């Protein structure tokens, strides 16, 4: 019953939310940033022409890559 209610409550979300086709549905993460950081992201987005989402994905990807390198050494 809870699952059915959850599915109904997210019915407005597009069925294929992946950035790349032919892969399973990606989870969405809601992240809140301090106003100062959000303003910096917006400014960087305007300077680079990249979306804020793309900048965040790149930053997280770089962080995970570096964390794995440090763990391996």
Image (cartoon, rainbow, N blue to C red):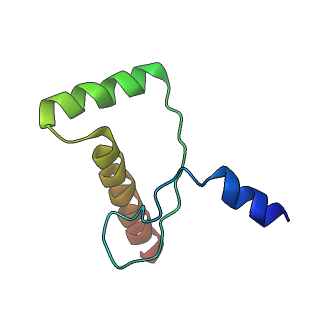
Residue drawn at (42%, 67%) of the image: 70
Residue 23: give x, y in percent of width and height: 39, 77
Spot occupied by residue 35 in the image (x, y as percentages of width and height): 46, 20
Residue under the image location 42 percent in, 65 percent down? 16
Which part of the image, by quadrant, shows the N terminus? bottom right
The spot of residue 42 in percent (x, y) is 29, 27
Q: Name the residue at 42% across, 61% down.
A: 17
Q: Is residue 71 left or right of residue 19?
A: right
Furthest residue toward right: 1
Farthest-out residue, left = 48
Task: In this rendered view, identify the residue nearer to me: 59 or 1.
Answer: 1
Count of number-bearing discs? 0
The quadrant holding residue 21 is: bottom left
Where residue 5 appears, x then y in whole percent? 77, 57
Choose top left, top right, bottom left or bottom right for residue 53. Answer: top left
Task: Determine whether 61 is above or below 36 in the image.
Answer: below
Please state, as top left, top right, bottom left or bottom right, where the C terminus lies in the image. Answer: bottom left
Q: Nearer the viewer, residue 13 or 20?
A: 13
Q: Residue 2 falls in which quadrant of the image? A: bottom right
Image height of 21 relative to 8, above or below: below
Instruction: Give the side of residue 27 with respect to residue 9, left or right.
Output: left
Residue under the image location 49 percent in, 31 percent down = 33
72 over 41 or under it: above or below: below
């Amino acid at each position: 019953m809870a699952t059915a209610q959850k599915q109904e409550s997210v019915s407005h979300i597009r069925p294929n939310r992946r950035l790349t086709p032919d892969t399973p549905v990606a989870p969405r993460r809601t992240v809140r940033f301090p106003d100062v950081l959000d303003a910096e992201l917006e400014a960087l987005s305007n300077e680079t022409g990249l979306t804020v989402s793309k900048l965040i994905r790149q930053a997280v990807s770089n962080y995970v890559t570096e964390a794995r390198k440090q763990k391996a050494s």
